[in-house]
Image (cartoon, rainbow, N blue to C red):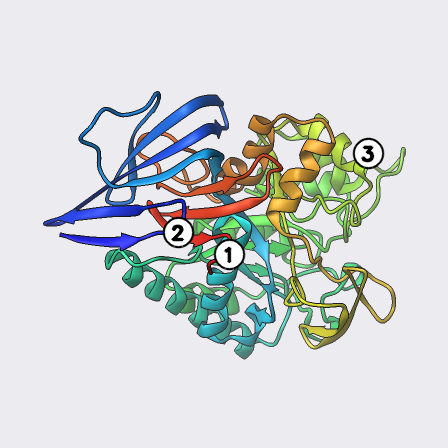
Amino acid sequence: MRSYLGGTQAGLSYCEVGSVRESAILLKELVTPSGRLRNAFIRVVNGVIREVREGRPKPPTPPLLNYSDFIGVPGFVDTHIHGIAGADVNSGDVSEVLRMSKELVKYGVTSFIPTSVTAPHEELLKICTAVREAISNWGSSAREGEPLGARVLGLHLEGPYINPVKCGAQNPKYVRRPNLEEFREYLRACGGYLRVVTLAPEVEGGLEFVALIASEGVVPSLGHSNAGYEITKQAIRNGLRRATHVFNAMRPIHHRDPGAVVALLEDPSVYVEVIADFIHLHPATVKFVIDHVGTWRAVMISDSIPATGLPDGTYELGGLKVVVRDGVARLVNGALAGSTLTLDKAFRNLLKLGYSLTEAVRMTSTNPARSVGEVVLGDVRPGCRADLAILNDELGVVATVVNGVETYSLGRS
């Protein structure tokens, strides 16, 4: 028998008999995308949820993670993040990706997709390899039942196949037209873990590229694009299924030129990324987007950069100088350069707009997972991975559980 000692309020997180690890989680309240349970009990076997119900278990019970004074929600899923606490995806260093994994659980994030910015081909290949190796390292730790960081789901290539007139904080020096041979090299280097590609469908070869990406099981996402309404509709017909930080680095809506935004918002097959820091979008715009697409299509992202969690100062993103002042990251020309947002804050910002806990869970956990085809993440029901963010009454993160193992507790990292 083997046990892992959790935090001050947690107790034992699992017991292992043979190849079976079983544990139980107690919560004051559990919030899922479909409802809320009081005095919730969750039974976990080998990191997978087997039972969820109201009421306290009768002895004997498996070792407990006792969060009976706290609220549990599905762990947050960040599908667009460039870095945090100094760790940078574009470094191409596997240790940086794993450091992000360990850092993100402090904010209740249990899964994430490291996201690159536009860079030379060889640098992007290096990033692909680093992400693939990080996934392998994470999986080895999970098999050993060790305390984990956030699970690494794969790579999001934000660029380089974007429109140079909508670069935003992407380095225009490395922007280029879609290249099928490059793309196939990225697929191979990722070892099957290339998840999302942000591109501009209006550039030469863009529409055909959308179809190719979709045919390989990768999610094409429109972003850093000057596409009009009709081209966007064609891209959706070709397999486009996502909008990268809607409104930002896109052609604005005009009453005679609705542009990409209207086409993306109106199509029920498209998931829509939103940066809910109330800086990239006015709060009223965030609410407009969510109310239009509904709480089952809106995907909250952080778009956070390596400066997240660090003091104001001067940093770098993709070879460009970034100045962070009062938590707002900008290039020297004044353009916004990603964010210093974390998903727990985005979750609380949604509540400020009047959305319920259940709706906020959908947009920070369930929808991000489903938008990349992950059906056993972002929810708390039998068959799902036992990934939870544990919140206090002020909705601050006090603990994080990944695969049924407490991997972070407030005051102990």
Residue at the spot of label 2: 7
* Amino acid marked by disc 1: Gly
* Amino acid marked by disc 2: Gly
- Residue 402 or 230: which is nearer the viewer? 402
Q: Give the residue at x 61% y 55%.
A: 198
In percent of width and height, residue 316 lies at 70, 74
* CA distance separating discs 2 and 1: 9 Å
* CA distance separating discs 2 and 3: 40 Å
Camera sees residue 343:
yes
In the image, residue 228 above or below residue 168: above
Q: Give the residue at x 56% y 55%.
A: 197
- Residue 211 or 245: which is nearer the viewer? 245
Mark 3 surroundings within 10 Å by alpha-carbon count, few (fewer than 14), some (14 through 19), many (20 or more): few
Mark 1 surroundings within 10 Å by alpha-carbon count, few (fewer than 14), some (14 through 19), many (20 or more): few
Secondary structure under tag 1 reads loop
Residue at the spot of label 3: 284
Q: Give the residue at x 53% y 39%.
A: 391
In the image, residue 220 above or below residue 330: above
Q: Earlier in the sequence, mark 1 or mark 3?
A: 3
